[in-house]
Amino acid sequence: MNQAKKHCYLYTRVSTQMQVDGYSLDAQQDRLKKEAAHRSLQVVAVFSDEGKSGKNTTGRPQFQAMMQRIQNDNEDHVDYVLVFKLSRFGRNAADVLNNLQIMQDFGVNLICVEDGIDSASAAGKILFPVLAGVAELERENIQAQTMAGRWQKAREGKWNGGQAPYGYRIEDGVLVIEDSEAALVRLIFEKYVQSDMGINGVAKWLNENGYSKQTRQNGIYSRISTTFVRGVLDNPVYAGKIAYGRRKNEKIEETRNEYHIVKQAEYETFDGKHEAIISYDLWQAAQVKRELNAYKREKRYSPQHAHILSGLVKCPVCGAPMYGAVNRKKKKTVPANSIRTCGTTFARIPKP
C-alpha cells in the first residue's frame, strides 16, 4: 500500500541584487520543485515575493499570506516549507526564528535546499540559529556596500537611480532637462524668492493663473499642491547638485523591527554631471527664505500657546481627535482656549 505523500509550500524571494546575480524567481522555483520531487513531497502552493528585502517580513505580502494559511489551522495539511536558502526566508535573525517557531507550532518545518538543513532534524535545530545570525550579518554587509556605492556615485556627480525629479528625464543614466517641465520649476523658485508669497501662496497663485503639472503615470494634468512646491524648493538637484543622505531609513520607536523614511536636516551635496535648471544663488535665496519662515512659525507657536493634549483628547460626539487653537483678530493674538470638534465646530474651554 502506497504511503500518502507529505505536502509542502514553496517560498521564493528576490531582491534587485539577487536578480542581478542570477537567482531569479524562476530559477529558485525550478530548484525547489526538483527538491520536492526528490523528497516525494507534493507541492500545494507557491508563494513568491519579487523585489522585496529580507530585512523584515512586514513588507512581503506573499510571505504573510503563506504564514496566514499555516496559522489557519494548517488547512492544507502542510508538513514543510521549502526555500532556496535561509536568506530567502529572511535576513533578520529574530524574525527567522520567530516565524520558524510559529510554523513548528502548527506542525510545519523548514527545509533550506542550498544550505542542506532541515529544521526537523537534530542538526537543523542547532544550525538554524547560527545561520539566521549569518544571514543577518550578510544583510548588514550588503547594506553597507550599497550605501558606499551610492555615496561614491553621488560624489562623482551621478544620479543615484530611481525616477527623475520633475523637470528632468533620464538618458543613459544621466539627468537631462525636460523643457516642458523645467519652465514650471523656474517659475516656482522665482515667485517664491521674488515675492512675499510663501509656499501656500505660490501654489495658490499658480493654480489661479492656470498652471498645472502633468502626472507622469497617466499624462493627466493636475493642480499644483503645496507638497509639490515644497519638494521643488527643497531639492538641490535643480541647482546642479547631487544630494546624498537627504532621507534616512530610521527605526520607529517602540517597535521591534519597523522602519520609516525620515527627511534629514543635514546632508551632503556634490557637483552634478547634469545641467542646472536654476542658478545656485537662486536656490540659496530660496533656502534662506525657507529658514526665515520656519523661524517665524516657531515664534508664532511658542510654548505659551502649546496645547499638550492636542490629538489625544477625543470629541465626545463623533470620537474624532481634538486640537487646540488660538484665535487671532487684526493680527493681535487673543488666547481663547478653544478646541476644534467634529471637523467644523469649536467648543470653548473655560479658563482655569
Image: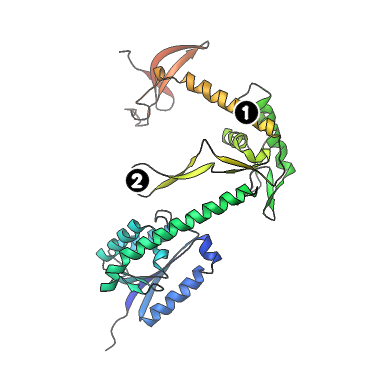
Q: Is residue 205 left or right of residue 57?
A: right
Which is nearer the eye, 351 or 229? 229
Classify residue 131 by image quadrant: bottom left
Amino acid carrying mark 2 in the image: Thr
Question: Which residue type does callout 1 highlight?
Answer: Lys
Residue at 34% in and 48% down: 256
Circle 2 Cα neighbour tier, 10 Å, few/some/many (<14 / 14–19 / ≥20): few
Q: Secondary structure at mark 1?
A: helix
| Residue 327 visible in the picture | yes
Residue 351: name its quadrant. Answer: top left
The answer to which image quadrant residue 194 occupies is: top right
Q: Pointer 2: what residue?
A: 255
Return the x and y of residue 80 as percentages of the image width and height.
33, 71
Q: Can residue 200 be seen here? A: no
Residue at 38% x, 82% y is 38
| In the image, residue 153 above or below residue 68 | above
Residues at badges 1 and 2 in contact (C-beta under 8 Å)? Answer: no
From what the image shows, is residue 142 above or below residue 201?
Answer: below
- The residue lying furthest to the bottom in this view is 1
Number of numbered callouts drawn? 2
The residue lying furthest to the right in this view is 179
